[in-house]
Image (spheres, rainbow, N blue to C red):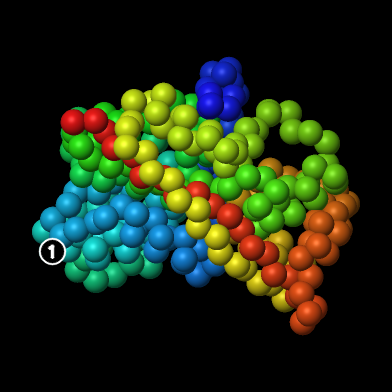
Amino acid sequence: MKPQETPSLMSQMDTQRYKAQERAGFNRIAAAYADGAPLRARLADALLDAAGLAPGQQVLDLASGPALLAAAAARRVAPGGLVLATDIAEDMMAEGRRRIAGSARPAFAVADAEQLGLADGRFDRVLAGLALFLFPQPDKALKEVRRVLRPGGRFVLSVWGARDRVPLIGCALDGIARGLPPPKVARPSVCRYGELGALEATLSQAGFDDIRLQPCEFDCRFDDADAYWQAFLGLAGGAAEALSRVPAEGLAKVRAATADALETYRDADGGYRLSTLTLIASARRPA
């Protein structure tokens, strides 16, 4: 199966605007993103298990956010290992520096995943948790990943599953689509790698082999629609930035439409229970 269309076809101007909005959005939500880590704990553990980390390894974590995945990886490669956490959003990196203590902690660097500026063959592993779909030119990011991996090293990543299996973000996206006009700059679907075969085909085309895929499903429960909405905002950098500019009347329409979408997931206790599917992939740079 061929990879789905990617935003690599965006114009240079649109790519720059997209990156600027994502950076601003993730800077905006840095603390909330870190606070929401328990929602994604099962996924983080599954990704690290798939990476097969061992003491002494050199690891790069792309789009690391507040570096919580990187911090967990640093504990697994100690003693003697190194984890470098990178992100385009400097406030995310600052949030990680504030929160992470101890001797086994990552190093930090503000960097664009599509232009890393790191040495060839430097790392045993490259990690990317819920990140590949954020890159406007993922082919460039994958080329960089392959370059900085040593021959035989592995790229381990997670992505959202198929759109109808990801209510954690899907309900809010439905509410936004119903309550607001289409965005001026088209955004690629964050679930585009969740369709059958799309992620494997993308990694294969980028020159990786020995590609292994596994599903990871996790549940999230919210007492009410407001708790769900705040959790969504704490995940969605670019969307959170765009929504911050929406007038109150428009935002009220989005919130109401989101609450309607959530009704499918109401549980016996009056809250909402959402089972969300992600995919974890491990792929090798050929020796």
**From the viewer's perspective, is 172 left or right of 280?**
right
Residue located at (85% from left, 45% from top) = 178
Q: Nearer the viewer, residue 202 or 79?
A: 202
Residue 94 rendering spot, x and y as whole percentages: 39, 56
Q: Taking 134 as reference, is 203 left or right?
A: left
The answer to whether residue 62 shows anywhere in this view is no
Q: Determine the residue positioned at 59% across, 24% down.
A: 5
Residue 66's x, y, as percent?
Answer: 42, 57
Judged from the image, the secondary structure of the residue bearing numbered disc 1 is loop
Where in the figure is residue 149, as x and y percent of width and height? Answer: 24, 36
Q: Amino acid at mark 1?
A: Pro
Image quadrant holding the C terminus, namely top left
Other residues around mark 1 within 10 Å, as few (<14) / some (14–19) / many (≥20): some
Please state if 4 lies on the left or on the right of 95 as rendered: right
Number of on-image labels: 1
- Residue drawn at point x = 47 percent, y = 39 percent: 132
- Eyeballing the image, is 88 above or below 71? above
Q: Which residue is mark 1?
A: 79
Q: Is residue 55 left or right of residue 145?
A: left
Report the residue that reaches farthest toward the bottom: 269
Q: Which of the pair 190/247 is nearer the observer?
A: 190
The one nearer the camera, 38 or 242, is 38
> Which residue does the image show at 24% across and 65% down from the upper left?
75
Is residue 269 shown to the viewer in this render? yes
Reply above or below: 22 against 236. above
Q: Position of residue 160 (x, y in %)?
A: 56, 48
Q: Is residue 167 above or below residue 177?
A: below
